[in-house]
Amino acid sequence: MIMTHTEQVIANALALVEASRAARERDQQRRAAWQRKVELSRPLPPLPRPVQLPLALN
């Protein structure tokens, strides 16, 4: 089947949209993996200073 110019333009546009969607999904997955690595590599927050509770001996 021979495609008309219009059909060819539409097919090219759809292929471009699909390629763009695939690239966006790959980037999103790469960013999520990078974010997990960053979360794991962060130092632990400092522990709060201990608070001594008063002891009533009366």
Image (cartoon, helix red, strand yellow):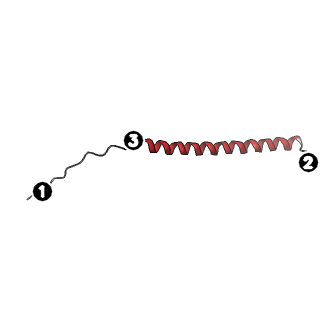
Q: Is residue 51 left or right of residue 6?
A: left
Give the image location of residue 18, x and y in percent.
72, 45
Closer mark to the observer between disc 2 and disc 3: 3
Numbered disc 1: secondary structure = loop
Circles 2 and 3: CB atoms closer than 8 Å: no
Circles 2 and 1: CB atoms closer than 8 Å: no
Q: Where residue 48 is drawn, which disc sits there?
A: none
- Which sits earlier in the primary sequence, circle 2 or circle 1? 2
- Which sits earlier in the primary sequence, circle 2 or circle 3? 2
Numbered disc 3: secondary structure = loop
The number of discs equals 3
Closer mark to the observer between disc 3 and disc 1: 3
Give the image location of residue 58, x and y in percent.
8, 59
Q: Residues within 10 Å of mark 1 (few under 14, many from 20)?
A: few
Observer-nearest of 5 and 48: 48
The residue lying at 59 percent from left, 44 percent from top is: 28
Q: Residues within 10 Å of mark 2 (few under 14, many from 20)?
A: few
Numbered disc 2: secondary structure = loop
The residue lying at 47 percent from left, 41 percent from top is: 38
Q: In the image, what residue type sits under mark 2?
A: Met
Q: Where residue 43 is drawn, which disc sits there?
A: 3
C-alpha distance separating marks 2 and 3: 62 Å
Give the image location of residue 32, x and y in percent.
55, 45
Q: In the image, what residue type sits under mark 1?
A: Ala
Closer mark to the observer between disc 2 and disc 1: 2
Q: Where residue 56 is drawn, which disc sits there?
A: 1
Q: Is residue 53 left or right of residue 34?
A: left
C-alpha distance separating marks 2 and 1: 94 Å
The residue lying at 45 percent from left, 45 percent from top is: 40
Q: Where residue 1 is drawn, which disc sits there?
A: 2
Q: In the image, what residue type sits under mark 3?
A: Pro
